[in-house]
Amino acid sequence: MDINRNFKLALKAEYFGYSTDDEAEAWNLPDIEASLFLDYQIDEHWFAGANLFFVGERKDQFAVEQSFLPVGLPKTITLDSFFDINAHVGYKINSQLSAFAKANEGKFLDRWSKSGSIITKLEGENQVVVKIDGKYWMYWGEQFINLAWSENLYDWYPSLDDMGELQQQILVHC
């Protein structure tokens, strides 16, 4: 919903029902998730916003591990629901500043991610950015870990699947 040209508000809520025919629980999957997004364009260059996420209770298994082997049987536990609040402020110098602003005609421009991490290696006591097969690599994302690559650390291109969507590398269970 656009309150005016400079302010945007979005609310998303989802309720899930899972089949547990093959498992005792729907592991790490909440019954409810909700998100609230607020964005404000202060002027031509400055912008700010906030995002509020809610994730409901989830079931998980807990076992004490020793030398990569569990000690005793896993115990079913309930993970608490949680809120995650994020704020952002920025200055848009030009359309080239955002990592994904021009990638795939801006398809992933509004994809939210708190941060990305560029692959490094340890040299002495310092982390040094490293190329792998001639490219720099960054991993980023919230629910899924995604990859992006760059040849110059300025222009980034997300790894895509055969359908042109973000290639989901790892599903993150919190």
Image: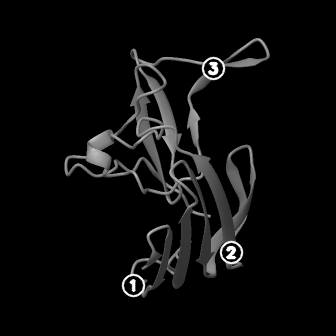
The residue beneath circle 1 is 19
- Residue beneath the point at 42% across and 36% down: 148
Give the tally of numbered discs: 3
Q: Give the spatial CA distance, label 1 vs label 3.
A: 43 Å
Q: Which mark is residue 121?
A: 3
> As rendered, which of 35 and 49 lies closer to the eye?
49
Q: Earlier in the sequence, mark 1 or mark 3?
A: 1
- Residue beneath the point at 34% across and 50% down: 166
**Where, by quadrant of the figure, is residue 54 drawn?**
bottom right
Q: Earlier in the sequence, mark 2 or mark 3?
A: 2
Q: Give the spatial CA distance, label 1 vs label 2.
A: 26 Å
Decide: marks 2, 3 in contact (CB < 8 A)?
no
> As rendered, which of 42 and 69 lies closer to the eye?
42
Residue 146 versus residue 57 in the image, above or below = above
- Dot 1: few (<14), some (14–19), or many (≥20) neighbours within 10 Å? few
Residue 155 versus residue 66 in the image, above or below = above
* Callout 1 amino acid: Ser
The picture places residue 83, in percent across and down from the top left corner, at 68, 74
Decide: marks 1, 3 in contact (CB < 8 A)?
no
- Of badges 1 and 3, nearer the viewer stands 3
Residue 100 versus residue 151 in the image, above or below = below
* Callout 3 amino acid: Lys
Q: Is residue 163 left or right of residue 155?
A: left
Q: Is residue 29 left or right of residue 82?
A: left
- Residue beneath the point at 27% across and 43% down: 104
- Which image quadrant: the N terminus? bottom left
Q: Is residue 77 left or right of residue 108?
A: right
Task: Please indicate, yes or no, whether residue 106 appears anywhere in the rendered image.
Answer: yes
The picture places residue 145, in percent across and down from the top left corner, at 49, 49
Q: Which mark is residue 83?
A: 2
